[in-house]
Image (cartoon, rainbow, N blue to C red):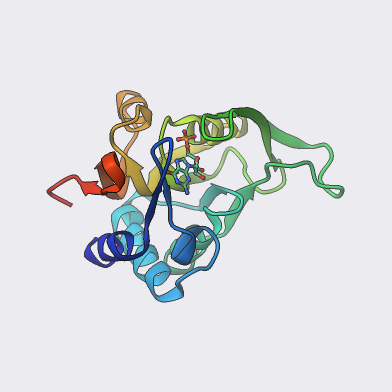
Amino acid sequence: MEHLKQKILREGKVLPGNVLKVDSFLNHQIDPVLMQHIGEEFAMSFTETGVTKILTLESSGIAPAMMTGLKLGVPVVFARKRKSLTLIDHLYSAKVYSYTKNETSEISASKDYISNEDVVLIMDDFLANGQAVLGLLEIVEQAGASLAGVGIVIEKGFQDGGRIVRERGIRLKALTTITSLTDGNVTFKEEQ
Ligand code: 5GP
């Protein structure tokens, strides 16, 4: 996705620890026009799979998931990273380890919004070591729902997440794949 690549090249900042900061359009300030294009791209990729629900993780997965949900005409559920006062039980939950934060958190989503009749598209902003996606997958499994696939805005191809997800036979669509962040430079996988 050329628009996304150009945005990453112009505005992305490489931080120590192989972290890409994209706060100017995805993780803090949000570019709605880019999100619209992102939503259209994911909707096109997954329209044949019969998605009934999108499941993402707060907070940075919500914007791309919303635009995809709008295009596909399906609701978006975001798993919470913190316990909510109004969401105490009747929950699916999974543990997610974050390498960037070096901490494990418990993500959860209400049983009211995902059932065994759903076909779920999992979405997130980044795929790195795959822990967030595996946690969301666990929620889909707990619900007994079917999986349409996984949609990722930026895959860090030099980390293991993509391999782990593909090896499970899951359909994975990454809009852009970064092969290296060495020396502050972003390198993309060619064919995207
Ligand atoms: P994973 O669970 O695949 O290791 O990491 C994915 C999660 O960590 C995403 O939800 C994302 O929020 C965060 N993350 C991982 N790598 C990066 C990165 O380079 N930049 C940003 N902004 N977030 C990242």
Between 24 and 162, the one lying in front of the other is 24
**What's the residue at 66%, 48% (across, down)?**
113
Residue 6 in the image: above or below residue 32: above
Outermost front residue:
183
Task: Please name the residue shown 83% across and 37% down the image.
Answer: 89
Using the rendered view, name the quadrant where residue 8 is placed.
Answer: bottom left
Front-most of residues 30 and 87:
30
Judging depth in this view, the residue of 78 and 48 nearest the camera is 78
Q: How many marks?
A: 0
Residue 86 relative to residue 103: left or right? right
161 lies above or below 12: above
3 over 93 or under it: above or below: below
Q: Position of residue 24 (x, y in %)?
A: 46, 66
Residue 86 appears left or right of 17: right
Which residue lies at the image location 48% right of the left edge and 35% below the top edge? 133
Q: Is residue 130 left or right of residue 138?
A: left
Task: Pick out the residue farthest to the left.
Answer: 191
Instruction: Examine the image and state in which quarter residue 108 appears.
Output: top right
Residue 3: x and y in percent read 27, 67
Residue 39 at x, y percent in the picture? 39, 64
Q: Quadrant of the N terminus?
A: bottom left
The picture places residue 150, in percent across and down from the top left corner, at 40, 42
- Residue situated furthest right in the rendering: 85
